[in-house]
Amino acid sequence: LLYAESLSAARKFMSAARAAARNKPVLMVKAGRSAAGERAAASHTGALAGSDLVIDAAVRRAGMLRVDTLQDLFIAAETLAYFSGASEVGERAARARVTLLTNGGGAGVLAADAAAALGVELATLAPATVQALSAGLPANWSHANPVDIIGDAPVERYVHTLSTLLATPDTGTILFMHAPTAIVPALDIARALVPLVRDHPGRLASCWLGDGAVAAARALFHEAGIPTYETPEQAVHALAMLGAYLQHQELLIEAPPWTEHADAEPPTLDLDRVRKLVDDALAAGQDPERVWLSDPDAKALLDACGIPVVPTRIVAPQPEAAAAAASALGFPAVLKILSPQITHKSDVGGVALDLGSAAEVHAAAAAMLARVTARRPDAALEGFTLQPMVRRPQALELIAGTHVDTLFGPVVLFGAGGTRVEVVADRALALPPLNQPLARALVQRTQVAKLLAGWRDVPPADLPALARVLIALGQLLAAEPRIAEIDINPLLADAAGVIALDARVRVDAAAPGGAERFAIRPYPAELAEPFVWEGEGQPRTVTMRPIRPEDEPQHLAFLARLDPADIRMRIFYSRRSIERSELARLTQIDYEREMAFIASAALEHGPGEETLGVVRAQVDPDNIEAEFGILVRSDLKGTGLGHRLLAKMIDFLRSRGTQRLVATVLLDNRRMRELAASLGMEPAATQPDAESVRLEMPLG
C-alpha cells in the first residue's frame, strides 16, 4: 500500500513499481488530483507533482492500481488479496466479468445500475446455464443476469444456484447479495454456501444487507476469507477496481504475438529525412532553440514516419496565386493561412473548406488575408497552403499527439479531435514505447472508441492503422530528441484507414536525449550484434540481441528443448512446465534493472526465428553488483555459444558502470564453472554452502 504526494526520478519509480507489481498487488493513493490539492502537495514536499493524467498513465503501465481515498485503498486491498490469484489471460478476462446473484430484485437492479455506471461487464448466461438453473428454481426466476432466485428461497435453492454458477467458468466473479427474510436465517444460508466456495477460490464476493440479522452470516464469510461489502454499490465498486487492476496487469506483462501480418508491423521511420527537416527548421527559426515547423514541413515529418497525410502545396500570399494553384490542384480544395506565428489557424479565421472553383478560392483568400491581418497584425504572412478536400463522410475526427511531461518525459495522447477538442476533453494518455496491444488499449480508454467500433451502417474504423500512428509517434520521440511536441488534429479515421489533415510540430534544440527522457526505457536495439557462427558445422548468421516481448513464443520453444538436467543446473531444481505469466516476465523485462541477451537465428525451414541460448543478469538498484545466469540449448552445448553470450553480457555491464559480476553455481556444474573461469571469474572468499559455489569478478 502506497501513499504519495509527489514523485521524482520517474524512471527509477517506474522500474521499482513494475518490479514490485509483477510479484504482488501494489495499490497507491496519490493526493493532489485537484489544483488546490496539487498546490498543497507541492508546498508540503517541495517537489513537482507531475500532470495527474500522466501519473494515471504511469500507474496503469506499471501494473499498479490507483485509488482516490483511503477507504478505497483498504477495500481494494481486501478485494485484491482474495481475487488476484488469476495468472492466465483467459482466467483474468473471466474474473473481470460479474454475475449478480440475489434473493431480492432491488439489490440486483442497484448492482446492475452501478455496474453500468462503472463499466463493469456483466456475464451473459449461456442457454445451458439457464437450463441448469431452471431445474432448481421457480418458474418466475429472472432467467438472466442478475440471477434473482426470489425472496422465499430456502437454503436448497441457494445451494443449487451457487453450485451451478460456480461450475460454469463463463460466469466469472459471482457477487452474492442477500436481503434478510423470515423464511430462513441468514446464518443457515452462510453455513451451506461456505463449503461450496472452498473448491472455487477467488470466485465469490458477498453483500449481506442489514445489520444484526446478518451479522453472524457476515462474520462466517469473513472467517472463510470471502470478501463482504456493506452495499451493492460498494461491492460493484470493489469489483470495478479489481477489473481495472487485472487490465493493468495485462499491460504490465503484454507480449504481442510474433507474426508477419501487416497489422503487427511497426511503422517505417525515415530518420535521415526527419533529422533534415528538424535541422532546417532550427536553422531558419527566429528562436534558435524553440521552433514550430511549417505546416508542409510538419506533414512531411509525419510522412517520414509512415503516417498518411493529405498532399499540401504552398502558394504566395496573393488571391490570384491561390486561385491559379487551386485550378492546377483540382477541386474541391481547402485553403489555409501560412504563418510561423499562427499555430491555431481556425482561431483567426485562417481556414476555408470545400472551395469548388477558382473564383471561390480567390474570394476566400482575399477575405482570409483581411481577417487574419485584422486579428493578428503582428503575424508575418508567408502565404497559403492548398490541399484537396478530403471527403470521407463516415470518418471520425480524432486527435493524436505527444508532449513532454516535466516528470515522466514523453507522453502519447489520443482522443476525439476537431475544433471542439478542448471543450469535449475526451482524451487518454500513455507512456511510450507502445506496441499494437498497448496502442489499442490507449484508444479503448476514450469515449470515441465506441464510435470507432462502428454503429448502425457505419463499419468499424481501421484500428491497426490507428494504432500504427500512435506507435510511430512514440518511436519518433525516441529517435529524434529535438522533437518536443506533436499535435495531429484532425486525424481522420474510418474503415479505409487514417489520414492526417493538419499537424503542428515543435522542435527544441535544448531537449534532453531521446530514449533517456523516457520513463520506460525503449527497446535497446543498438545493442544487437550479428555474427557468423559455425558451432553446428556450417556457417550460420546468429544475432545476439536484447530479448523483447515478441520473443515469447520462440522462448517457450527454446525452453521446451532443454534437458531437465540443464534446467536443474540453472535454477537448482527440476520443473516440467512454465506458466504464461512467468514466461512473460522472462521476455518483457525492465531494461533499466536487468538485461537478457538471446542468441537468435532464422529458422532453417519456414519464417520466423529460434532462440539458441540466453544470458540474463539482474543488477542491484545501486549498480554495484550484477548476478548472471546462462542457458544454451541442450544440443548446442560445447559449441562456444555460451562463451560469446557471457562475453557480450560482461561488455554490456562494463559499459553501464556495474562494478562486480557474480554467480551462484551448483558444485557439480563443471561446464559452467569452466566457462566462468575462462572469462576471469574466481571463487569468492566466502561460500554459501557445500553444494554450490559463488563466483565473482570485478568489472572496473
Image (cartoon, rainbow, N blue to C red):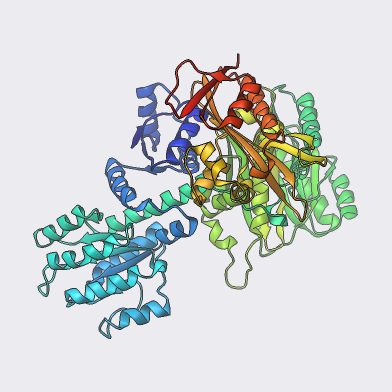
Vertical relation: 253 (above or below) 111: above
Q: Where is residue 325 in the image (x, y as percent from the top left)?
A: 88, 49
Q: Which of 158 and 438 is in front in this view?
A: 158
Q: Where is residue 690 in the image (x, y as percent from the top left)?
A: 43, 26
Q: Position of residue 334 (x, y in %)?
A: 77, 52
Q: Is residue 534 left or right of residue 126?
A: right
Q: In this view, does 354 lie to the left or right of 90?
A: right
Which residue corresponds to the image point at 26% horizontal and 54% vertical from the top-left? 227
Q: Position of residue 70 (x, y in %)?
A: 28, 40
Quarter of the image holding residue 317?
A: top right
Count of numbered circles in the view: 0
Residue 149 in view of the camera = yes
Quick one: quadrant of the C terminus? top right
Q: In this view, does 236 lie to the left or right of 477?
A: left
Q: Which of 46 and 375 is in front in this view?
A: 46
Vertical relation: 147 (above or below) 443: below
Q: Which of 300 and 382 is in front in this view?
A: 300
Which residue corresponds to the image point at 37% horizontal and 38% vertical from the top-left? 28
Q: Nearer the viewer, residue 549 or 313?
A: 549
Residue 512 in view of the camera = no
Q: Is residue 347 left or right of residue 6?
A: right
Judged from this view, the residue extending furthest toward the top is: 700
